[in-house]
């Protein structure tokens, strides 16, 4: 069975029920999440062995977060305990023309204060097939770029495939900061994941003739962006999500993978969204599953996009779709008819 390790921050998510605004409620629904945690849970749902690495405070709330990972079959034996805070965020879900809102409260969280010597990557990555992290994790604290780079270098030495989702977050750092730090890290990556904003903000490469805010997208420009990134950083594979937003409730969804000097596009799905948070993470998880299991390039992008499409129909951040459910959608069964 293939094994993947994810490294990042697990957080407390607090959100009003349904589509209420913050100002309308006096209680929040609580669950635990984080970009790499989402990937690990999604991979566990497909039958892969997933191990999650993070640092959390030694208190009851953090133990609830770690117990959530165990609940979904994710290993946590390399979690580091220490520090004072578990990061959190507040989510107000949008609908129709009203956008969703996210407010972070993660400054001085345990992982943001982590030190390089706290993670024994030689041990953590032994017998592992894939290592996954995101640009979010790199941006969390002054030691995180070095920690992620350490992990990438050990992974490369051990023959572990390195997956990185750029995941630019303007609330964590500026494009100038990202472009100063990320190139060295990306040079140690095998598979790079992102979208049109990530490529521009993190690595300074823009897709021409596209404007995501206006719902405009030129597919061929993404081929050029992927080619540039592949050649500049020596990447085996570059994969982008292609989202056009009709509204907060309805999006068109597709993807592109660039590998072996060729581009492959998925079919396009018209989605009515239940919860879009974690959509990109489910795409990354789909890529990891497909690549680790030897899918060809076309099947890989089809699988990743179908997996992520299903995630948009699932409440909260985790994609709990099985391989058979993903393959059914890939095969054209998108009717949503009741299964009896």
Image: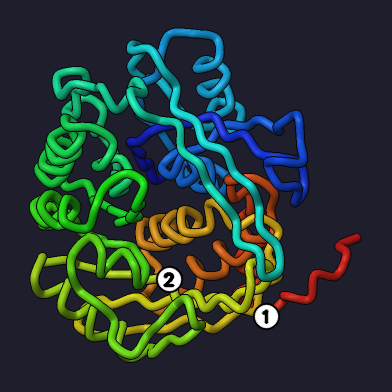
Rendered position, 252 above or below 32:
below
Residue 241 marker: 2
Total marks shown come to 2
Disc on the earlier residue, 1 or 2: 2
Q: Is residue 248 visible?
A: yes
Residue 231 location (% of width, % of height) = 10, 75
Q: Residue at x 52, y 15 (%)?
A: 63
Residue 332 marker: 1
Q: Residue at x 12, y 52 (%)?
A: 188
Give the SS element for disc 2: strand
Q: Is residue 78 visible?
A: no
Q: CA distance from mark 1 to mark 2?
A: 20 Å
Residue 185 location (% of width, % of height) = 14, 50
Residue 8 location (% of width, % of height) = 35, 36
Judge from the rendering whether residue 115 lies leftward or rightward of residue 304; answer left or right: left
User: Looking at the rendering, in which quadrant would you find the C terminus?
Assistant: bottom right
Given residues 294 and 74, the one toward you in this image is 74
Give the SS element for disc 1: loop
State if disc 2 and disc 1 touch (CB < 8 Å): no
User: Looking at the rendering, in which quadrant would you find the N terminus?
Assistant: top left
């Amino acid at each position: 069975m293939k094994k993947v390790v994810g490294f990042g921050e697990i957080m407390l998510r607090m959100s009003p029920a349904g589509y209420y605004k913050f100002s309308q409620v006096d209680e929040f629904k609580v669950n635990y999440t984080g970009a790499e945690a989402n990937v690990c849970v999604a991979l566990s749902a497909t039958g892969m062995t997933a191990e999650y690495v993070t640092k959390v405070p030694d208190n009851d709330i953090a133990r609830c977060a770690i117990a959530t990972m165990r609940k979904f079959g994710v290993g946590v034996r390399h979690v580091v305990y220490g520090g004072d805070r578990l990061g959190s965020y507040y989510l107000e879900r949008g609908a129709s023309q009203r956008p969703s809102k996210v407010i972070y409260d993660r400054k001085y969280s345990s992982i943001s204060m982590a030190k390089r010597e706290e993670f024994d990557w030689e041990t953590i990555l032994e017998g592992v097939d894939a290592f996954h992290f995101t640009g979010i994790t790199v941006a969390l604290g002054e030691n995180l770029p070095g920690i992620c780079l350490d992990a990438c270098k050990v992974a490369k030495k051990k023959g572990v495939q390195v997956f990185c989702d750029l995941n630019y977050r303007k609330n964590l750092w500026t494009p100038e900061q990202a472009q100063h730090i990320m190139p060295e890290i990306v040079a140690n990556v095998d598979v790079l994941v992102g979208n049109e904003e990530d490529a521009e903000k993190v690595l300074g490469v823009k897709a021409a003739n596209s404007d995501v805010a206006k719902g405009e997208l030129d597919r061929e420009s993404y081929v050029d962006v992927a080619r540039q990134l592949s050649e500049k950083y020596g990447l085996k594979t570059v994969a982008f999500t292609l989202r056009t937003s009709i509204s907060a409730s309805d999006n068109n969804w597709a993807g592109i993978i660039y590998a072996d000097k060729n581009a492959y596009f998925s079919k396009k799905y018209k989605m009515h969204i239940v919860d879009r948070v974690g959509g990109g993470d489910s795409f990354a998880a789909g890529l990891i599953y497909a690549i680790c299991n030897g899918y060809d390039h076309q099947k890989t992008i089809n699988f990743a996009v179908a997996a992520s499409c299903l995630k948009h129909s699932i409440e909260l951040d985790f994609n709990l779709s099985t391989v058979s459910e993903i393959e059914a959608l890939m095969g054209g069964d998108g009717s949503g008819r009741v299964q009896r």
